[in-house]
Image: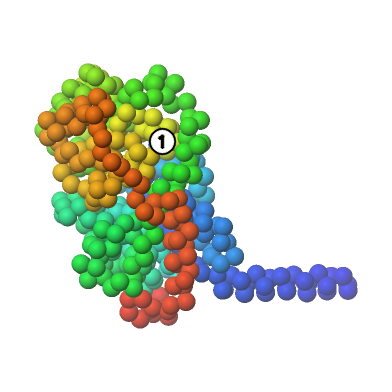
Amino acid sequence: MKTRQVVTNKFVTVWRGYFRKRVDMVKILNVVGARPNFMKMAPIIAEMKRRGGEISQTLVHTGQHYDDAMSGAFFRDLGMPEPDVHLDTRDGTHAEQTARVMMAFEGALAAERPDWVVVVGDVNSTLACALVATKLRIRVAHVEAGLRSFDRTMPEEINRVLTDQLSDLLLTPSPDADENLLREGIPQERIVRVGNVMIDTLYRQIERAQRSSILDDLRLIPQGFAVLTLHRPSNVDNPETLRLIFAALGEISRELAIVFPAHPRTQSRMREFGVEPPPGVRVMDPLGYLDFLKLWSNSKMTLTDSGGLQEETTALGVPCLTLRENTERPITVEQGTNQVVGVDHERIVSAAEAIIANERSKFARVPELWDGRTSERIVAALLSRADQQECQGERAATIEM
Ligand code: UD1
């Protein structure tokens, strides 16, 4: 009897301690939705786990990307925990996708009622979740805030501008991003320059990636090939543009093989338009993070319209040709290995030929704060502001549904 009493008392004490600790913890809800979000969120989750006593975190996957190749493979490669909540919203038009994420996320958010919602990047899920959280008066932190292409025909640009306007804490990768935000009227006290969180993942995974057998599997030798990625609507939704790009790549591929892990939207557009890549371009399904890192880091150059790859190639000093007319990441051109060549045949071919001939002597360096410790600065910024009851206006004590 006495023993049972002691055990019960001990249980009550432990439970009270646990409960008090939980109450003191900062509740953070992290959102991912599409492929480029996963490598940004992985180190943030790991850092929050490291500071586990101070934070209780929940991971929500909106399901914008749902294929194993676009989502599941990244969770495995990056050692991410299974999402606590999966909204399984899938695709549709931009309005449908954004609306579906908003509707599903509202319920998840009301159930959790976190201190912070953390969104990353510029995909539809980023904006949808930031909008829902703001209307429920829950604070939003945006990782990779302030990037601007100044091209409003890009869906991602609309997502960037609006997410930044809604967010309470703007975590930026570079000085240009800070300047863009200040110009748009965001108060300085809401901006914290933390560096580039994708580079945390890159540095953490580079050694593991070198163990991938992808080069042998594809019978490639280091520096003996180029890597291509292409999925922007402006490049792949128009058959003429796609043909123009492929014509330039055909010329390059006579000198250097091109490997092309193709995004599902690009594969379906190529089928729909009946546009075939030239023979020297090897098309394959999208690769996981580690295989892809091994591939591009051993390539002679990358040709891409992806934002993330412009940054990653800069961090490792691999030449990058951006097949777009602009970039929201100008620091990769000013300081890094990136050259914006658009979709003009001559510009693409002559820039590629200079790289093949090793004529390219562009001075390149890794930008400040792209040092693998950005996730630590992000979590520190969230915790240091956790006590503030409000950032943008008064926060309601209860959430009315
Ligand atoms: C989205 C992001 C873009 C990001 C890109 C990276 C927006 C506005 N765009 O573009 O910023 O660079 O992801 O991948 O959010 N699909 C599949 N399987 C999947 C996911 C998509 O087959 O797992 C197909 C869809 O059916 C659709 C197409 O790919 O036909 C486009 O997907 P969507 O999520 O709408 O946008 P992305 O073009 O991938």
In the picture, the quarter occupied by the C terminus is: bottom left
The residue that disc 1 covers is 293
Asked whether residue 15 appears in the rendered view, the answer is: yes
The x, y position of residue 399, in whole percent, is 40, 75
**Number of marks in the rendered image:** 1
Please tell me which residue lies in front, 151 or 302.
Answer: 302
In the picture, the quarter occupied by the N terminus is: bottom right
Q: Is residue 372 left or right of residue 362?
A: right
| Residue at 45% from the left image edge and 50% from the top image edge | 372
Disc 1 packing (10 Å; few <14; some 14–19; many ≥20): many
Say if 68 sits above or below 189 in the image.
above
The x, y position of residue 346, in whole percent, is 12, 30
Q: Residue furthest right?
A: 2
The x, y position of residue 171, in whole percent, is 36, 62
| Residue at 61% from the left image edge and 71% from the top image edge | 21
The x, y position of residue 325, in whole percent, is 15, 44
Q: Which amino acid does the dot numbered 1 rest on?
A: Leu
The quadrant in which residue 287 appears is: top left
| Residue at 32% from the left image edge and 79% from the top image edge | 393
